[in-house]
Amino acid sequence: MIFAKERIRYFLYKTINWLSTFAKSKNVIQNSLLIIRLDAIGDYILFRNFIKALKESDKFKDYKITLCGNIAWKEIAEAFDKEYIDEFIWIDRRKFERDLICRYKKLREITNTGYEVAIHPTYSREFYYGDTIINLVTAKEKIGSIGDWSNIAKWQKRISDTYYTKLIPAKEEILFEFYRNKEFLENFLGQTIDIRKPTLAPVPCELQLPKKYAVLFIGASAEGRKWPMEYFAKAGEYLRDRYHLEIVICGGLDDGHPEEIRMKFGKKVHNLIGKTTLVELCWVIRNATILFSNETSAPHLAAAMDVPVVVIYNGNYFGRFTPYPEEMTNKYIAVYHPEIEKNLENYRRLSNRLGYASDLDIKDIPLERVIRALDERLANGKS
C-alpha cells in the first residue's frame, strides 16, 4: 500500500513538473546565482552567516544572488540578510506538498529565470523539494552536496544525483551542522572561510518586557520533541522563586491555548505564545537572562546571540544540532535523556545511533536534572 501511494505521488508530481516547464526560461542571466535552502529555521541560522562570505568572495562579488527559501524563516532573512541577497523566492512547504496548483505556480515562478549557477547546500536533501527545483531550473552549473540518506530513499537519490553537474563530497562522520555548511561552502568556493560560529544581531522591538526574565520556549516541530508543559511550569516556578526571574512563555500558535497556559502556569507569567514575529522573538530571547527550551529553533537563536541556554533533548539528530561545540559557546547546556547520559562519553557510537532520529521518550527526562542544569547556568550570578 505504501509503495503504491509513493508511485502515485511520484507520477503526479512528475506530471506537475512537466507542465511547469512549458514556460521555462532557456536564457541564462549572466553573473546570477540561485541558492536553494528549504529546511527549517534552525538550519538557516546555522547557514546564513556564510551568505556574506559567498557574496564577498572573488568569484561571486559581482553576482546577483537569489535565495529560494522556506517561508518559515522569511522574516529573519529579509530583516537581517537582505544586504547580501538581491531577490527572494519563498516556498510554503505545506502548500508546496499538498496543493498541486500552488506547487505548479511556484515551480513556474522559479523556472521563469535562468541562472549561471544554482547551488543546493543542504546535506540531507529532499527529493520532492530542493532536488526537484534543481532538476527543473535552467542553470549552467547545478551544484549540491553528495548528502546522506536521512530524508531521501535510495531509489530517489540515485535519480536525483543525476540532476546535478557536480556533487560536493562530504565527510562520512556526523558533523555539527554549522561545520557541515562550512565544509560545503569552502569546497564550493575553493577557499578557507574564517567564520567560527553563527551570529545574529537583533533589532529592538516595541514589546513590553520585564526587566529581568527567563524565556521558556515550550514548542517544537514534533510532539516527540516536546517536554510536558506541566514540567515546564514547575521549572518556571523554580526560576521565579530561586532566582527572582519573571517568566516569559514563547512558542507557536499551536503550542498552547491561553486557558491551558493559565491552568498549567498560573497568572504570574507573560504569555507571548503566538504573539511575536520571528524578529520580535529574537529580541525577546536576546534580552533574557536565560532561555530554557525544547530542542528547536529557539536555542539556535540564543546561541547565535550569545544568550545562556538550557535545552531539553531526547537525542534527535544527535551530533548535528546538539550539543553545541564548546569552541562556539560555553553558555549552552543540553539536558539529555537518561539513556544518553549513561553513555555520553562514547560520543561516536551515540552519534551513529542517534544521528538521524531518536525513539527515546522525552518525558523520561526528570525535572531534577533540569533544575541542576538551570542552577549550573545561573548559580552565583554567572549567566
Image: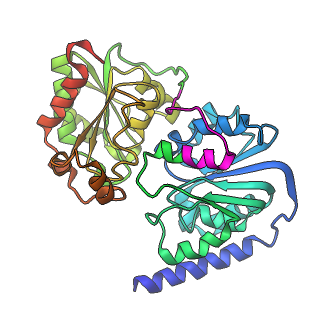
Magenta span has 192?
Answer: yes
Q: Is 338 located above or below residue 106 in the figure?
A: above
Q: Is residue 249 above or below residue 20?
A: above
Q: Find the magenta span and give its range.
A: 182-200
Q: Residue at x 80, y 67 (%)?
A: 24
* Percent x, y of residue 60: 77, 42
- Residue 222 is left or right of residue 340, and the answer is right
Q: Give the answer, above or below, for where 177 lies relative to 302.
A: below
Seen in the picture, residue 52 relative to 225 is either above or below; the reply is above
Left of 324 or right of it: where is 51?
right
Horizontal relation, residue 242 to residue 56: left or right:
left
Q: Position of residue 10 (x, y in %)?
A: 56, 79
Q: Is residue 184 magenta?
A: yes
Q: Quadrant of the C terminus?
A: top left
Quadrant (top left, top right, bottom left, bottom right) of the N terminus: bottom left
Residue drawn at x 43%, y 23% is 286
